[in-house]
Image (cartoon, rainbow, N blue to C red):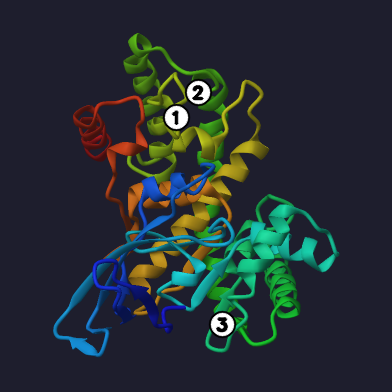
Amino acid sequence: MLDATFQFKELTTGNDLAVQPDAIAPFDLEALLGTQREGSPGLPLSIRSTEARLGDENIQGQATITTTIEFHQSPKPYVLVPGGWSPLALSPTRHFLIDRNILSLLGQLESGISNPRLERFSWWWTLLDQSGVSLNPLPSAFEGGRQQALSYEEFVKEFDSAVERLRRAVKEAEVVRLGEEGLRAAFAEVQAVQSRQSREADFLVAICPATLANVVKREHRRQACEEILNALQERGLDSFSLVSLCVMSALYRTASGGDYPIGQKLLKPTLGYTHQDAYNALSDLRHLEIAAIATGLFLKPPALLTEDTALAALWTVLRPKGTITTQGCALVLEVDPALFTGLHPRDAERLVQLLRNR
């Protein structure tokens, strides 16, 4: 993916510029949302390189090249990388976590279904079927097929089924398989999350229809915020977590609809919000959590591959990463005020501080 040489032409001299990239800056929220608009001018590309050649002359030292890049297809699925996101063609990693949505699209392709979305997905998927690429379906196995708590046997069945679907979809890429020890260790993580996820689901079912289904008026936000914090405390949930930040994002969203309300897009609150709806939202957040924790466990961590724009947006504004503590793995989050579209940046910072210290 980053093993290609970029070829440019300098506008002022007409000289050819050849660049072997050392790193490409991850793309931000603005670039992500720009891909959703008609007539997008392309993505702002920033390349760092110590191997660049202008015409017949080698450029000494480190060079930074800024330009724009366009693709024949919308750059989905997104690769969630440290600090932002990347199109597959520019991915800094060859190791990927695969979720159930990706597997579903592969199943549709296998069935011979044809539509513009699948044509775009198929175009990008060909980039993954290369030697040296590894595909890991653990996120889809964590989610399960029946959308409820899994037994160990069900977890193994889900994982093996996902492995087989991926193996049918590629010829050159490696599909990660786990032995008994690896599966047991992975399932232990599933069990560790299940209790918390049940309490989070109850929390969302209590808050989403009553508080978040409609935009909360500015004069009522403080009271709603206190109700949310009390609901978290009653269920023994952390006030500074992926779930609480998404809920606060949905609470502090603009009424105009001009900005992108990340929390509302992820949680999808309605007056008829159910445990099924909560489960779907929490499954997406677990995928993000798995990918973030991996950055603290591996020198070359796998990156989550997702079709979900809202999930990519959340990753981009939180910049999550994993760290090892005496209690185990933990998430580190850097919250961008853009998460709260209805707040001034200074007020957003105060809210984040409140959530951290609660």
Furthest toward the front, the residue is 13
Front position in the image: 18 or 74: 18
Q: Residue at x 61, y 43 (%)?
A: 279
User: Along the line of sight, which residue is nearer the eye, 291 or 307?
Assistant: 307
The amino acid pointed to by label 3 is Glu
Mark 2 residue type: Leu
Sooner in the amino-acid sequence: mark 1 or mark 3: 3
Determine the residue positioned at 29% across, 78% down.
15
Look at 51% across and 54% down and name the residue there.
286
- Label tally: 3
Query: Residue 125 at what x, y percent from top left?
Result: 63, 70
Frontmost residue, 20 versus 273: 20
Q: Is residue 356 left or right of residue 321?
A: left
Q: Which residue is mark 3?
A: 181
Dot 2, how many residues are within 10 Å of its Cα: few (below 14), some (14-19), or many (20+)? many
Could you tell me the amino acid type at mark 1?
A: Ala
- Residue assigned mark 1: 250
Residue 238 found in image quarter? top left
In three-dimensional space, the C-alpha distance between marks 2 and 1, rounded to whole angstroms, equals: 6 Å
At label 3, counting other C-alpha atoms closer than 10 Å, the crowd grade (few under 14, some 14-19, many 20 or more) is few
**Circle 1 crowding by C-alpha within 10 Å: few under 14, some 14–19, many from 20:** many
Residue 287 screen position, x and y as percent: 52, 57
Q: Quadrant of residue 73?
A: bottom right
Residues at marks 1 and 3, CA–CA distance in whole angstroms: 40 Å
Tag 2 and tag 1, C-beta contact below 8 Å: yes
Which dot, 1 or 3, sits closer to the camera? 1
- Residue at point 41%, 26% (across, down): 253
Residue wearing tag 2 = 212
Q: Secondary structure at mark 2?
A: helix
